[in-house]
Amino acid sequence: MKSGYSFRLRWWAIALATAGCAAGVLLGNWQTRRAEDKRAAVATEKRLELRGEFLERYTVLLDNKMNRGRPGYHVVQPLRLADGRHVLVNRGWVAAPLHREQLPHLRTPPGLHEIEGRVLEHFPRAYAPSGAKPEGRVWQNVELATFAVWSGLKLEPYVLEQHSPLADGLARNWPRADAGVEKHESYALQWYSLAALSAVLFFALSIRREHKPG
C-alpha cells in the first residue's frame, strides 16, 4: 500500500474559511481605523487660554461620570470673558454624595482667572430618551443650544475642557485624546490573526491522506 495526499474542496470548509477571513479582515480594519482616528485627534487638537469669571448661578452637573471607579458629576459653568462673550467650560469632576437626592458642595473661586484647556466641539453625549428636557441642576447631556435657552446667554460655538489648576477641589485627570490606541492596535492584530488562521484551517481541512494499492 502506498500513501499519498489529495486536495479536495469541501463546501462547508469554504464557507467557514470565507466567513472567518471576512470577519477578521473587516473587524481588523475597523480597529485600525479607530486607532488612526485617535492619532488624528491628537494631531488636530486645539488648546486655548481664556481669561474670565465663572458664573456660579448657571452651574449644571453632568450626571453619571466616573473617576477611578467612583461615581460623580462633571461641573459645567459658563466663563464670562472681558469682552462680554461666554464660553461653556467643563471644569472637572466632583464625587457624588452618598444619597442621590443630595448635591455635592461646590467651590467657585470668585474673580478673574486664567483658564487653559482643550477645545471641543461638544460635551460627550450620553443616551437619553428622545425629547427629554433637562430639569434642575443635574442633566444627562449638555447641549450648547439647550444651555443657551435655559440660561439666556449667548455662547461661543465650542466648549472648553479645563486643564489648568484652580483651588476648587475638582479632579481634572482627563483621558488623553489618544488613549486606547494600543488597545485598538492589539485588537486589530487579533482579528487579522483570525483571518490568517481561517485560511490555514481551510487548507488543513481540504487535504486528505489516501492509501493506494502498491
Image (cartoon, rainbow, N blue to C red):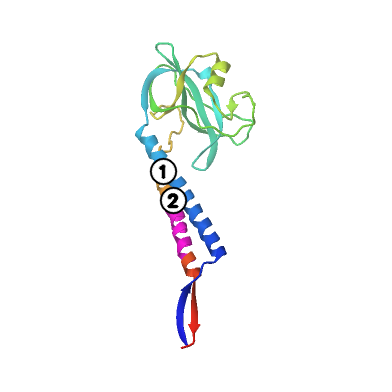
Location of residue 73 (image quadrant): top right
- Residue 24 in percent (x, y) is at 48, 54
- The reply to whether the magenta stretch includes residue 156 is no
Q: Is 84 placed left or right of 133 in the picture?
A: left
Q: Secondary structure at mark 2?
A: helix
Earlier along the polypeptide chain: callout 2 or callout 1? 1
**11, 160: nearer the viewer:** 11
Location of residue 190 (image quadrant): bottom left
Residue visible at 57% across and 16% down in the picture: 149
Numbered tag placed on residue 35 in the rendering: 1
| Disc 2/disc 1 C-alpha distance (Å) | 9 Å
Residue visible at 48% across and 20% down in the picture: 78
Residue 180: tell me if it is visible: no
Q: Secondary structure at mark 1?
A: helix
Q: Which stretch appears magenta?
A: 189-201
Location of residue 38 (image quadrant): top left
Q: Is 57 placed left or right of 32 in the picture?
A: right
**150, 26: nearer the viewer:** 26
Vertical position of residue 110 compared to residue 75: above or below: above
